[in-house]
């Protein structure tokens, strides 16, 4: 744990329970991934994630073939074609995809599908706090996994494989942890006004 993290933790914790709460906070920080150097040299941390990406790519290829979908050259559409299209855009100087590109077309399709699936998660959850409704967690989990299918497809079409997602997650997680340690206040938050 860095000194600035310890100092910040002391500010958050009451004196009488500071040792117990400091241990709990350190445990939560570890679970959140706030490791000193964020490296995992002794193991492959993304093997299950890589497997999910491989399986989703295979499923998408099967769907493309079964549905007779073709790319702009009238060849059978494949995830390799979509991934390579995004990687080519990213390799260009601008890294910007035009609205009519194959990449933007499929990003749009997968965003719509993901949005619908996340909506189905919400529909599976009772929100009327005054009712006696219950949530079927098995159904909620199914809907979450449905959303995961489209999230992985979206990642692939944007040019990210499992390792790229893992690295971007580590980078963003580090930013989010730093924000929390620095007393992050979102833009537009009323407490941001001095």
Image (spheres, helix red, strand yellow):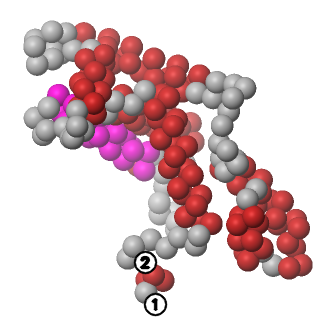
Q: Is residue 40 above or below residue 70?
A: below
Q: Mark number for residue 189?
A: 2
Question: Dominant secondary structure of the magenta stretch?
Answer: helix
Q: Is residue 20 above or below residue 84?
A: below
Apparent side of residue 128 relative to residue 97 in the rendered image (left or right) = right
Q: Nearer the viewer, residue 89 or 191?
A: 89
Total number of numbered discs in the rendering? 2
x, y percentage for residue 120? Answer: 39, 43
Q: Mark number for residue 95?
A: none
Secondary structure found at label 2: loop
Residue 150, visible in the rendered structure: no
Q: Which residues are magenta?
A: 102-122
Residue 194, visible in the rendered structure: yes
Q: Is residue 101 above or below residue 38?
A: above
Q: What residue would you read off at disc 1?
A: 194
Mark 1 Cα shell of 10 Å, populated few (<14), some (14-19), many (≥20): few
Residue for point 10% across, 13% down: 73
x, y percentage for residue 181? Answer: 62, 66
**C-alpha span from label 2 to label 1:** 11 Å
Secondary structure found at label 1: loop
Apparent side of residue 138 relative to residue 5 in the rendered image (left or right) = left
Apparent side of residue 150 relative to residue 38 in the rendered image (left or right) = left
Residue for point 70% across, 48% down: 36
């Amino acid at each position: 744990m860095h000194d600035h993290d310890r100092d910040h933790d002391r500010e958050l914790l009451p004196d009488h329970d500071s040792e117990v709460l400091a241990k709990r906070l350190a445990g939560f920080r570890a679970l959140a991934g706030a490791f000193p150097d964020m490296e995992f040299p002794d193991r492959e941390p993304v093997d299950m994630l890589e497997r999910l990406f491989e399986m989703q790519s295979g499923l998408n290829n099967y769907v493309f073939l079964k549905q007779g979908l073709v790319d702009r050259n009238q060849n059978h559409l494949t995830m390799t074609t979509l991934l390579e299209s995004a990687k080519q855009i990213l390799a260009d100087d601008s890294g910007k995809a035009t609205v009519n590109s194959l990449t933007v077309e499929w990003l749009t399709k997968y965003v719509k599908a993901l949005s619908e699936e996340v909506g189905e998660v919400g529909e599976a959850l009772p929100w009327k706090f005054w009712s006696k409704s219950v949530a079927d967690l098995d159904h909620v989990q199914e809907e979450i996994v449905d959303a995961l299918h489209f999230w992985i497809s979206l990642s692939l079409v944007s040019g990210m494989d499992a390792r790229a997602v893992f690295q971007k997650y580590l980078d963003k997680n580090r930013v989010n942890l730093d924000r929390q340690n620095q007393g992050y206040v979102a833009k537009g938050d009323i407490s941001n006004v001095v």
